[in-house]
Image: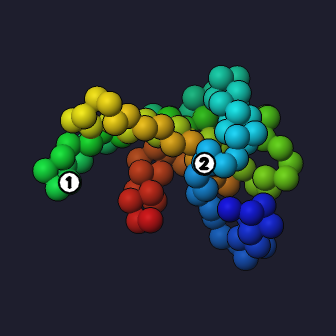
Amino acid sequence: MPKKTVKIILDSRNDYLIEAKGNQPKLLEQLKDIVADNTLLNTCLTQEKNRGRKENRYHEIYDALEGIPECWEGVKSVIYVHRYGHRPDKKRTRVIIQNIITTSQAVHSRMQKK
């Protein structure tokens, strides 16, 4: 998502939840550093069974007061989501930024609405 889109979201007084992906290697590296250096605020483990498959998600929310480049306006927390299920070779980690500080359960709920 372009940074100018983030500004439009904030100008319209809305919140955002944005996944950092592999095509943003610099941002991903900065987020990993933030997670290593900042406070863990909240965690949550969720389990779901969907289409006969069991999936676990472990959410970690970190304070992002330091380390986020100014061009990513309004970021207040970094979320790591570790996903794993019945196939051990299919583990996945997602890194997400958001402009609010909330609980892991609320993040999980917001992500399910996507």
Q: How many marks?
A: 2
The residue tagged 1 is: 50
Asked whether 91 or 95 is in front, the reply is 91
Residue 35: image location, x then y, percent: 64, 29
Residue 29: image location, x then y, percent: 70, 33
Picture residue at 13% right of the left edge, 50% below the top: 52
| Residue 49 appears left or right of 23 | left
- Which mark is first along the chain, 1 or 2? 2
The image quarter containing residue 58 is top left
Residue 38: image location, x then y, percent: 68, 27
Residue 110: image location, x then y, percent: 45, 59
Q: Quadrant of the C terminus?
A: bottom left
Amino acid type assigned to the residue bearing label 2 in the image: Lys
The residue tagged 2 is: 21
Asked whether 97 or 51 is in front, the reply is 51
Amino acid type assigned to the residue bearing label 1 in the image: Asn
Crowd band around label 1 with a 10 angstrom C-alpha radius: few (<14), some (14–19), many (20+): few
Asked whether 108 or 2 is in front, the reply is 2
| Residue 7 appears left or right of 14 | right
Vertical side of 20 occupied by 86: above or below: above
Residue at far right of view? 70
Gap between marks 2 and 1 measured at Cα: 25 Å
Element assignment for label 1? strand
| Residue 59 appears left or right of 79 | left
Residue 76 shows in this picture: no
Q: Quadrant of the N terminus?
A: bottom right
Vertical side of 7 occupied by 88: above or below: above
Element assignment for label 2? loop
Crowd band around label 2 with a 10 angstrom C-alpha radius: few (<14), some (14–19), many (20+): few
Residue at far left of view? 52
Picture residue at 61% right of the left edge, 35% below the top: 62
